[in-house]
Each structure stands twice: as structure tokens, then as C-alpha cells.
Image (tube, grey):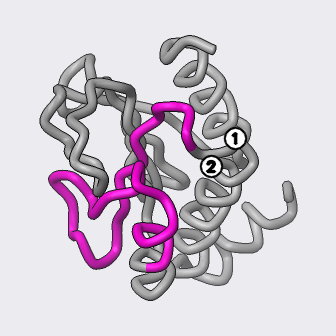
Amino acid sequence: MTDNLIAQQIEGYLLSKPDTSVYSPFGDDIKVFRVKDKMFATLALGKGNEQSTNGKMKGSFCINLKCDPDEAIMLRDIFPAVIPGYHMNKRLWNTIILDGSIPPGEIERMIDNSFNLVVSKMTKKDQASILVHL
């Protein structure tokens, strides 16, 4: 499967979340996904300077996802393609290098967790309007 196809599938999954929108405040190369104006993911073609834990330099698409701090460390230990959030708060965000090494279902689980973590910090009213669609 090509990098572009993987990125398209992930973008479709991100946009399938309730009340999700996409915009590009950092330029056309970086897509920011928000739920009710709160960012929960970014998707971009890596510049090649994101380094996985196995030392390989990558130029694949990358997705940044919000994460529980303990789980963030655990995922980095399990998957070489999960690194501390590139240009993000490294305690709360992971960058996933979409090189095909992580099963799609696991990536979807990480996306779900990011989305749910952001929604959990919203007002009860906003949460209710989103959760009714899940």
C-alpha cells in the first residue's frame, strides 16, 4: 500500500469522527483536525528529519495524536515508528510515522484515544452533542 493511500485512509477515518473539521493554519502541507475547534490530530508528509527509535530517518506521512502521558511512553517502547510529538508537547503528543509497520487497527485505536481525550476535556454540553453521534 502506498504512503499516499495510507494517508488518504487515515484522513477519511479522522473526518468520520463527529463534529470534526480540517484546516491548514501552518500551510497546505499540514492538515489539522479539530473537534469543536480543539485540535486532536495533524497529518503531514514528513520532511525526513523525524527519526524513529530504530535510528532510521523517515520521509513518510506522519500523524500527531494527543495521548495519555503513560500510554505515550508505552507506545514509544512498543513501536519504533512512534516517537515523541514532533513540534508538539512531547509529554502529551506522539508522532506516528506511517511507514506501514503499525497495523491499521492500532492506528485507528490511537486516533480514537486522541479524539476521546480531547472530548473529555470539553464542557458537558459539548461532550453530549458529540457523544450522541458515537
Under mark 2, the amino acid is: Ile
Nearest the eye: 111 or 106:
106
Asked if 32 appears above or below 7 in the picture, the reply is below
Instruction: Determine which quarter of the picture holds residue 14.
Output: top right
Q: Is residue 87 magenta?
A: yes
- Give the quadrant of residue 72: bottom left
Q: Is residue 46 left or right of residue 47?
A: right
Q: Vertically, is 44 above or below 128?
A: above
Contact, CB < 8 Å: mark 2 with mark 1? yes
Q: Residue furthest bottom?
A: 70
- The residue located at (35%, 52%) in the rendering is 95
Q: CA distance from mark 2 to mark 1?
A: 5 Å
Image mark for residue 107: 2
Q: Which residues are magenta?
A: 74-101
Question: Crowding near pointer 2: few (<14 within 10 Å), some, many (20+)?
Answer: some
Q: Is residue 14 magenta?
A: no
Residue 79 x %, y %: 48, 59
- Picture disc at residue 104: 1
Say which element carries label 2.
helix
Residue at x 59%, y 45% (from the top left corner): 102
Q: Position of residue 121 (x, y in %)?
A: 51, 81
Residue 73 vs residue 121, the one in the foreground: 73
Image quarter of the N terminus: top right
Q: Is residue 18 above or below residue 114?
A: above
How many marks can you see?
Answer: 2
